[in-house]
Amino acid sequence: MDTKPIGAALNRDITSGERAEKDLDAFIAKRDKARRQTEAEHAREELWQESVRRHDASRDAHLREEWHEYHLGHAERLRANLEALAAYHAAEAQKYLPKGA
């Protein structure tokens, strides 16, 4: 015969189950917080990378403009120097022509 008193099943200790549920809730909350932080970090990383791309594009455009100006100026300086040099040699060549020619 069963010797357990009536209602004995209702007197069970459920603190271990409640503790396990509390631990599970804490674990879920911790993982959710980590996921949210990871998503926020990912969003910040994407914004930073876009900022770097815009900065690099701006810098590259500026450098292309500077190099363009440099080469145009250098071409002008070379043209002026070479024209002066050509004029000098033409004048020197005239010195060696016969006097009556």
Image (cartoon, rainbow, N blue to C red):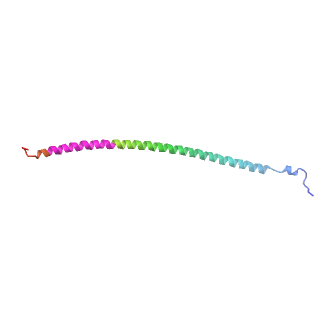
Residue range of the region highlighted in magenta in the rendering? 70-92
- Residue 56 picture quarter: top left
Q: x, y (%) of residue 88? A: 18, 43
Q: Main secondary structure of the magenta part?
A: helix
What residue lies at 35% left-to-right and 43% top-to-bottom?
68
Nearest to the observer: residue 17 or residue 99: 99
Nearest to the observer: residue 32 or residue 19: 32
Residue 71 lies in the magenta stretch: yes
Residue 41 lies in the magenta stretch: no
Left or right position of 14 against 57: right
What residue lies at 75% left-to-right and 49% top-to-bottom?
19
Q: Quadrant of the C terminus?
A: top left
- Residue 81 picture quarter: top left
Q: Residue furthest bottom?
A: 1
Left or right position of 1 against 93: right
Nearest to the observer: residue 98 or residue 16: 98
Q: Residue furthest front?
A: 101
Q: Quadrant of the N terminus?
A: bottom right
Q: x, y (%) of residue 20? A: 74, 50
Q: x, y (%) of residue 90? A: 16, 44
Please give the count of numbered marks on the rendered protein: 0
What residue lies at 64% left-to-right and 46% top-to-bottom?
33
- Residue 86 picture quarter: top left
Q: x, y (%) of residue 39? A: 60, 46
